[in-house]
Structures are given as structure tokens and as C-alpha cells.
Amino acid sequence: MKKTLLFGLVAVIALYVGLMFFLGHIVKAGVNTFGPKLTQTKVELQAATISPVTGAGTLRGLVVGNPKGWSEDNAFSLGRVHVDIAPLSLFGDHIDIEEISIDGPEFLYETRFVSSNIKDLLKNIEEFSGDKNKAAAEPQTKDGKPVKFVVRKFRLTNGVARLGVGPTAVPVPLPPLELTDLGVKEGGITPDQLAGAVMKNVLGSIVTGSAEALANMGSTRAANTLEQTKEAAKKAAEGVKKLFSGDKP
């Protein structure tokens, strides 16, 4: 009897570990395969673990490279991302994410006239969203349906944007960012819509924070770009509504 119970316990543990590894492998493979197509840059996720029972998971070592025309550094690195997912939704075509929490992300913010590396990265995502052939690259279920997402809460805390490249780069702390009910009204949104919505808000946070930092430094550059970057932040926030309504950027 004891041997039977022990064998059963070992089998349950093995099944749990196997499912956790299996789900983590799916997430990692999905990010590393779909990410570069979405951003048109390097995207690498080192590891992912997802509990098949609670739906809680952790993504580690996520980096996104710079778009073409900018430095070879990464546009941003997230380090560690915590997610809470409704477990049963992982096996359907509608993934319900209770929360995504990112703490301590680091962004590289390079600017050139009216453009920036982050803005170009966002432009790449929007171009993918408007590509008629994107369906072939999007994650799909076994039935061929597109996988859609609902994110009930997104939080980004203790973020830092480094203004410039190399040892002279100026670190700019970013204000906490919280978004709620992404994709709820739409009945789910595609990964590119989700990425676009988040990146638009991050861009707004970065340009506003950078403009204020430059103004505090009293630089000539700040005087010339303060209003311009504030306007970019305003447009970034407004762009979320356009993204969901189907308007072209």
C-alpha cells in the first residue's frame, strides 16, 4: 500500500514538472519565434516557467534588439517578468491573463531629429499589424484560429531609460505605468495589438521623462525638444485607441 502511494506521489510530481516544463517551453519557443517577426529585430527569451495548476509564471532574460539604423545595443531588457494566467485558458484560443508585472526594466532611448529607436520599434510593430500576410506568422491553435489575449492588469515599475549610448548615457527614472482591461471590450486582441498598446504607453512615458530630465539639466537640446517630445507622448497615448479601432497609424 505504501509503495503504491509512493509511486502515485512520484507520478503526480513527475507529471506536474513535465507539464510545467512543457508550458514553459511553449512560451519560450513562441516568443523566440514570433518576436523577431513582430519587431523585425532580435528577440530572445532565456527561460520561462508556467504552473499548470495556478497559472503563475515567470519569464527571465527577455531582450529586444534595436531596429535597423541604430546602435547594436538592445532597445530594452526586461530581466524578470511575472505573469498570472487563468490556467484553463492556456489550452484554448483565448488566453486570459490576470496580471503582467515587470519590475526594473531598462530601456535604451536613442534620438535623431524627430525619430528614435523606440519609435522605430513601434513602427515595425504597427507595420506588422497592417500586413495582410501576418496571419501565417501569428500564433495559432490546432484548429488554425488566431490566439487572442486579454490582460486585466499590466504593471511596469522601477523602469529606467538610458538617454544616449555609451558611458555618457543619462539614466532617466520612469514613472510607474499601469494599464487595465487590455482587450476586454474587443473580446481578445492579437499579440501585435497587445505589444503595440503597451509600447505606445511606454514610449509616452520615456519621451516625457526624458524631456523633463533634459529640462532639469538646462540643456539647449531640452529647450528645442521639450514641446516636441510632449506632443509625441500625447500622440502615443492617443494611438492606443486608433490601434484598437483599426485606424491606420
Image (cartoon, rainbow, N blue to C red):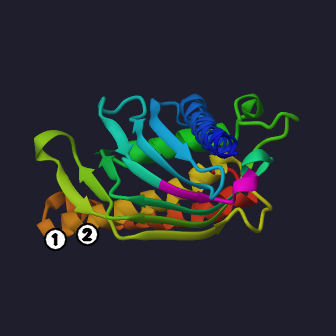
Q: Residues within 10 Å of mark 1 (few under 14, many from 20)?
A: few
Q: Position of residue 41 (x, y in %)?
A: 47, 31
User: Label 1: which residue?
Assistant: 216
Image check: 102 left or right of 151? left
**Quadrant assignment for the N terminus:** top right
| Residue 39 on the magenta span | no
Determine which residue is flagged by label 2: 212
Amino acid carrying mark 2 in the image: Glu
Give the distance between the C-alpha atoms of the residues marked 2 and 1, in whole angstroms: 6 Å
Q: Residue at x 60, y 71 (%)?
A: 180
Q: Is residue 10 at least partly visible in the picture?
A: yes
Q: Is residue 86 magenta?
A: yes
Looking at this view, is 168 or 218 the one in front?
A: 168
Checking the image for residue 120, the label placed there is: none
Kind of element beneath mark 2: helix
Decide if residue 7 is on the left or right side of residue 171.
right
Quarter-of-image position of residue 203: bottom left
Q: Are marks 2 and 1 in contact (CB under 8 Å)?
A: yes
Residues drawn in magenta: 82-89
Q: Look at 58% across and 51% down and name the residue there.
A: 196
